[in-house]
Amino acid sequence: MPIASFVDYFASIPDPRIDRTKLHGLLDILVIAVCAVLCGAEGWEDMEEFGRAKQTWLKERLGLALQNGIPSPDTFRRVLARIDPEAFRRAFLAWTTQ
């Protein structure tokens, strides 16, 4: 199952947020962002639009929690801007070259 591999590789990325600001799981954000970009998303709004359009699929097939719905464009921007780029690069390369 591809998502298990994604989770295995991307779970090691440190979450840069403080606990009280975490309305969405980091893996939920990363899965939606990566899937959206692979499907042609070009910006934060596209990521949110993709997530809303595929919300049921993301929950059912990928097991995303999405307890607070789909992250807003600002959430994607803030979280992804703070992710350690080297940790993301290592995880992405490991995932795509498995």
Image: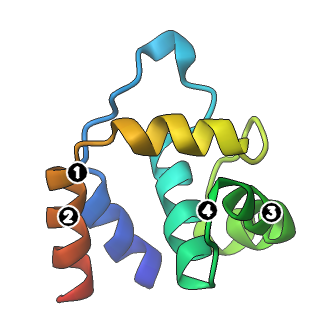
Q: Quadrant of the N terminus?
A: bottom left
Q: Is residue 77 above or below residue 39?
A: above
Q: Residue at x 25, y 57 (%)?
A: 88
Three-letter residue code for mark 2: Arg
The residue type indicated by label 3 comes to Glu
> Looking at the picture, which amino acid does disc 4 mark?
Gly
Whether residues under marks 2 and 1 lie with C-beta atoms below 8 angstroms apart, the answer is: yes
Label number found at residue 49: 3
> Which residue position is annotated with label 2?
89
Q: Percent x, y for residue 38? A: 53, 83
Return the residue at label 1. 85
Mark 2 lies on a secondary structure that is helix
Q: Secondary structure at mark 3?
A: helix
Measure the C-alpha gap from mark 4 to mark 2. 24 Å
The mark closer to the camera, 4 or 1, is: 1
Q: Are marks 2 and 3 in contact (CB under 8 Å)?
A: no
User: In x, y percent, where is residue 84?
Assistant: 23, 43
> Disc 4 or 2, which lies upstream in sequence?
4
Residue 41 coordinates in the image, percent (x, y) = 64, 74
Mark positioned earlier in the residue sequence (4 or 3): 3
Q: Bin the neighbour count of mark 1 within 10 Å (Cα to Cα): few under 14, some 14-19, many 20 and up.
A: few
Amino acid on which the number 1 mark rests in the picture: Pro
The answer for how far apart the CA atoms under marks 4 and 3 are is 19 Å
